[in-house]
Amino acid sequence: MIKPSQLCQGNSPERQTLDDPLRHLTACHRRIEERLDTLERVTPHWQSRRDEALAAVRNAFRFFDTNGVWHTEDEERSIFPRMRHGLSEDEQAYVGELERQHDVAEAAYENLRAIVGKLNEAPTGEWVAEYDAAAKTLARLYRDHIASEDSRLVEIGARILNATELETISAEMKRRRGLA
């Protein structure tokens, strides 16, 4: 079993981008999108290949429970607080909305986990439909959020954050992952 602290070891793309927090943010978004794709792709396989579908979903959940948590903490505990000093009123509201979106996505994720947790035997058509709706909701929430951060948040961060702040954010991100 891989420990969460080993997920970012070595020369992985994630470890390489940790020195550049804004680049890391967008690189992590691509990995989140890959897991969202997995969650959506398994829907037609629940009844014919249940064990494989469940394994794929559990792998995606492992990512969200480690890297996904770190990603949100990177933003809410490291990036957002250091950006606030240079934000306009409109940008302050935007960052507040991003934080609200984190809460909404977390609730949607917990809902999907609960649905998967109800799977004790062969999935029924009703269960598959409930899973599919929850997976699509989570994917839509995340994709909208990611698109916004990739365009607007990264631009704001590049404008506001200085080299010292970026180095501090990088160090915090590495500590969060047990790499420093």
Image (cartoon, rainbow, N blue to C red):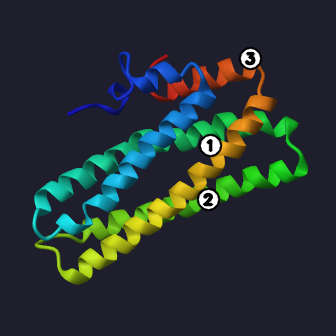
User: Callout 1: helix, strand or loop?
Assistant: helix
Residue 170, how many percent across, how many down? 60, 22
How far is disc 3 from disc 1 in space, using C-alphas?
A: 22 Å
Residue wearing tag 1: 150
Q: Earlier in the sequence, mark 3 or mark 1?
A: 1
Q: Are marks 1 and 2 in contact (CB under 8 Å)?
A: no
**Is residue 167 something that shows in the picture?**
yes
Residue found at the far right of this picture: 89
User: Callout 3: helix, strand or loop?
Assistant: helix
- 1 vs 2, front mark: 1
Q: In which quarter of the image is residue 114?
A: bottom left
Give the residue type that dot 2 points to: Gln
For residue 59, above or below residue 101: above
In the picture, the disc for residue 101 is 2
Give the residue type that dot 1 points to: Asp
Residue wearing tag 3: 164
For residue 22, above or below residue 35: above
Give the residue type that dot 3 points to: Thr
How far is disc 2 from disc 3 in space, using C-alphas?
A: 28 Å
Q: Quadrant of residue 20?
A: top right
